[in-house]
Amino acid sequence: MAIKKARTTYLPLPGKQWFYRASLLMLIMLGMTMMIMSKTNNPAIAKLRTHITDLVTPVLSIASSPMDVAHNMGTWIAELSRLREENVALKNENLELLKWQSAAKTMETENESLRALLNVVPEQKNTYITAHVVSDLGGPYVHSALINGGSESGIKKDEATINENGLMGRIVDVGANSARVLLLDDINSRVPVIAEQAHEKGILVGNNTDTPTLSYLSGNSKIKPGDRIVTSGDGGVFPAGIPVGVVMAVEKGTVKIQPFVDATKVEYVSVVDYSF
């Protein structure tokens, strides 16, 4: 059985051209007519324009939707990428923090074990009493100073006196409202010290000059000029670590010390209450 093919009607080429030109001409004329009519205050034209706007607006809205979606999609993808990078960075930071936390816990455990093993005594807490230097009672053989604080202020005998530069001396006499400080350069002064660089202990001995000396050093002492001298804490009179002076010279076994504190220029001192 033969199958009949549907016939399709085609306009001749000149007919097509005429149809397209006529349509374009009609659209132009329609547009010009609407523009001219829109200039008038004809209520019918205004109403028609409103109806056309109502019909066109949904079409324009639908047409613009894909662009909005594409824009929002791009923003969402960028935000997702940023969040992913931040998440990776936070994970890496968290891993580092966990490592430090583990190390801290390990050190804390080791510290507690060492303290228990060594039976460490808690560090002594010092208290300070500030006083004013009121006069110099020094002479050719006695180098001391008088301060305006005594037993009523809590000052006791043998306590160390310091200023912002270091050790000045120790309390030797205490009254109710006054006390006498024996300076480092007095011939009766003896202070246990240690050289920080050489780690050698000795006794700072006053000699009534501006440069007291170190005694009771080992025969092969390695102390040299420029070494810093601080209190060793031996004897329980002076706290350990108070700056005393610097090695000025080493001459024929004699180690001369230049004290950090010039007692002639001191106006205020702090008395250190240090006891075991």
Image (spheres, grey):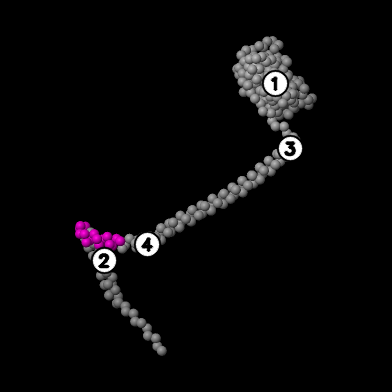
Q: Is residue 47 found inside the magenta-colored segment of the image?
A: yes
For marks 3 and 2 on the same chain, the one whose residue lies earlier in the sequence: 2
Precedes in sequence: disc 3 or disc 4: 4
Provide the residue designation for mark 3: 116
> Residue 7, position in %: x, y?
34, 82
User: How far is mark 3 from mark 4, CA to CA?
Assistant: 79 Å
Q: CA distance from mark 4 to mark 1?
A: 95 Å
Q: Nearer the viewer, mark 4 or mark 2?
A: 4
Residue 48 seen in this snapshot: yes
State the mark number for residue 62. 4
Residue 271 placement: quadrant: top right
Name the outermost residue toward the front.
152
Label 4: which secondary element: helix
Residue at label 1? Answer: 257
Q: Earlier in the sequence, mark 4 or mark 2?
A: 2
Which residue is painted at 73% across and 40% down in the image?
113
Which circle's residue, 4 or 1, is located before the other in the chain? 4
**In what element is the residue under mark 1?**
strand
Q: Quadrant of the N terminus?
A: bottom left
Identified by mark 1, the residue type is: Ile
Q: CA distance from mark 1 to mark 3?
A: 40 Å
Residue located at (76% from left, 26% from top): 221
* Residue depicted at 70% across the width and 24% down the height: 275
**Which disc, if any, is residue 27?**
2
Q: Which residues are magenta?
A: 39-54
61 with respect to 240 (left or right)? left
The residue that appears at 34% across and 62% down in the rendered structure is: 58
Left or right relative to 10: residue 209: right
Contact? badges 3 and 2 (CB < 8 Å):
no
